[in-house]
Image (cartoon, helix red, strand yellow):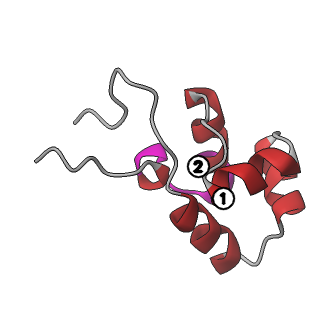
């Protein structure tokens, strides 16, 4: 199954926020666990940034989910 296609994936900001809050993590705590900046977490949740694949993998690892769970689903079929 191809979880991340050739185009740059888009993070589902609402899903990211939901997963973070479900684990009772602040933006800063998630950022520290994922080794990214707190601003990155905030911007991704608000849909104001396009993540690199590496960032998606880091956030997914910190949240204990597969990277595909953070990526917006395509409406192509």
Name the mark on residue 60.
2
Q: Which of marks 2 and 1 is nearer the N terminus?
A: 1
Q: Left or right: where does residue 49 sit relative to residue 67?
A: right
Q: Depth check: 4 or 39 in front?
A: 39
Q: Left or right: where does residue 44 sit relative to residue 11?
A: right
Q: Depth check: 29 or 14 in front?
A: 14
| Image location (x, y in percent) of residue 14 | 55, 67
Q: Depth check: 71 or 34 in front?
A: 71
- Say which of marks 2 and 1 sits in front: 1
Label 2: how many Cα within 10 Å (few below 14, some 14–19, many 20+): some
Q: In this view, does 6 lie above or below 11?
A: above
Check disc 2 and report its element: helix, strand or loop. helix
Name the mark on residue 46.
1
| Image location (x, y in percent) of residue 63 | 63, 58
Q: Quadrant of the N terminus?
A: top left
Residue at x 65%, y 58% (from the top left corner): 45
Check disc 1 and report its element: helix, strand or loop. helix
The magenta segment is: 60-68
């Amino acid at each position: 199954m191809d979880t991340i296609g050739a185009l740059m994936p888009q993070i589902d900001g609402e899903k990211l926020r939901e997963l973070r809050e479900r684990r009772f993590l602040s933006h800063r705590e998630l950022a520290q666990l994922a080794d990214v900046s707190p601003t990155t977490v905030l911007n991704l949740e608000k849909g104001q940034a396009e993540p690199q694949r590496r960032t998606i993998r880091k956030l997914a690892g910190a949240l204990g989910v597969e990277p595909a769970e953070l990526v917006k689903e395509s409406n192509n079929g």
